[in-house]
Amino acid sequence: MPSESRSFTVVLDEAMIRVLTGEPVASVCAAYPEHAAELAEALERMVAVRAASAFTPDPDRKRAARLRFHAALDARGNRRALWRVRLPRRLAVAGPRAAALSLVAVLAIVGSGTGTVLAAQSAVPGEALYPVKRSTERVQLAFAFDEQREADLRESLVERRMEELERVTAAGREQFVPELTEQIARHSKRMKAITVGRVETAVDTAASVALATPVPDSRPANGGSEVSVRKVVEVDDHLEQVQGRLDALREKMARSGFRSNVENLRTALALEQADLQRVLDRADQVRTQEEKPAAAGAQDAPLEVRPAPTFTPTPAPETESRLEKVNATVVDVKVLPPGTEPGVALALRDGDGVVHVVVLTRRGPAFVVGDGPASLRDLEIGGTVVVTVDTADGLVVEVRVANDARGD
Amino acid sequence: MTVLYWAAKAPIQERALGSSGREAAQATADTLAASYDEYYDRIARYAYVRTGNRDVAEDLAGEVFVRAVESIDSYRDQGVPLGAWLFRIARNLVIDHYRRSANRRHEPLDAAYGVAGADDPVAETEHALGMKAVRAAMALLNPAQQEVITLRFLGELSAEEAGAIMGRTPGAIRELQRTAMKALRAHMGAGESTEEVR
């Protein structure tokens, strides 16, 4: 019965899509009573396959991938801009407008600092010199190879577009509003992405650096993240202030009966701000975490942190390789930041109060958590681990959680 | 339903813009940026089933977007839906992965490695076992059947999008998927009964 078979094929497809969009299997089956039994079996199978292979991607890795993706997007934009500046003739075939733009871009380079370019700086949309102003900016952006410089530049461009927006609305030339708001949204987005990316890298580095390298005075080396965090606060303030001005503009426009996308822009900026807030919260968290081990150490002898692997429990015969087990207390556990090899950094305090850092990755040192299902999360701060050290070279061979070792 | 089909419309809107190539490429870049969250997870799950390794799957999902940016200009000429384009890149990366690791047989490390995973080790292990059963059953399907199941169940692609990737009509995709599900039923049924005996 080919027709019946085909109709089940179609029904199955429809039913599948309904389940994929969140409808319960039972209610989907009820919608096709003539195929209900067959359908139920197939759909349950699909649900099982999906359940078995479902996993939530690691948010850190996802974020790192997003940054990489946005960096590629940005790089693409910059490459294009450079290409436009360097090879203006090739663009001439794209149309007179593009040719004019590239000519202006070349003029902007050749004549930067000259009267025309300077005069153009105060131009607003609709004025003859305005394209010169914008082209100069594009050239500046194309040559902003350093991320921080690009973010700063975009911040100043947000400010410029905002001023222009205020001026064109005051002059009643509201046809320019959509393009300007679009520009503000675009610059804000990139500015945020760069700033957030930098602070996240700094925070991640601070989190692992505090553990993975010797810190002589036992204070976390988070100077880098401090600088970036300050930048986030600045950007946050700026976006806040821009939103205030947008509110004022929106009121003015409402009075003149002009409908615009200012509201959308305001929402977009609020969302960018939420991202900034999130990264600030995270920076705060890391900072308080970093302070903990330092505070604990302050009561005892000053913390001595050595780079891994430096376990040298007892002097050993110099030629012979010998394994020795050392009990140590877990002072801190940190998952290595995205972009590095997956693993964790452990800060361990041995019986003499000396803190050692052991970085565990899949390559080694070997990490044993016992026979049952367990994971590195079984490591608790304050818990005990047994570290097997090769006394010949001081290398950590194995780290085993202590409750497992006690069972032996 | 809307989620499944809006991506298919993206290139049409783009064509409707009738704008210059540069603007169209920018529009694609913007669409791509906006759909990162939606597609990243789906691609990661697809890659997980194809490779059996969560780490590789996540690397691969990230790489898809970078590759997409690199080939954004060629995308416009192909006229395929955004989802199909991204999954086509993912599929090629999976194939590359297999080629690279053809000489190094290794078991997925996921079960032994709990750092980046779930909060519950027991559930984690059960999940790993379920995954193993699914992969065993999937391995018994023919390549086209495997492909259609992963693209549609895990990638959540429409029949049209899956068709664009596999070079088949949507009707042929639906038919293929029906036979694939039937075959899967036979294989997974067998797997379950042996597990009950244990």
Image (cartoon, coloured by chain):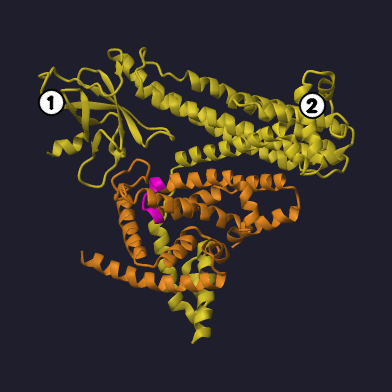
The residue located at (10%, 19%) in the rendering is A317
The residue located at (77%, 25%) in the rendering is A108
Foreground tag (2 vs 1): 2
Marks 2, 1 in one chain: yes
Chain that is coloured yellow in the picture = A
Left or right of B136? Residue A245 is right
Q: Does the magenta stretch include residue A350?
A: no
Residue tagged by mark 1?
A: A321
Left or right of A193? Residue A399 is left
Viewer-closest of B31 and B86: B86
Viewer-closest of B60 and A101: A101
Q: Vertically, is A61 above or below A232?
A: below
**Residue A158 visible in this rendered orientation of the protein:** no
Q: Give the range drawn in magenta.
A: B50-56
Is the residue under label 1 in contact with that under label 2 (CB below 8 Å)? Answer: no
Point out residue A66 in the picture as x, y percentages from the top left corner: 53, 40
Q: In which quarter of the image is residue A243?
A: top right
| Chain for numbered disc 2 | A
Q: Residue B60 carries which label?
A: none
| Chain for numbered disc 1 | A
Chain that is coloured orange in the picture = B
Q: Vertically, is B1 above or below B94?
A: below
Q: Which amino acid does label 2 sit on?
A: Leu
Q: Does the magenta stretch include residue B51?
A: yes
- SS for callout 1: loop
Residue tagged by mark 2?
A: A107
Left or right of B5? Residue A99 is right
Q: Vertically, is A195 above or below A50?
A: above
For this orientation, the residue located farthest to the bottom is: A1
Q: Which amino acid does label 1 sit on?
A: Ser
**Residue B29 visible in this rendered orientation of the protein:** yes
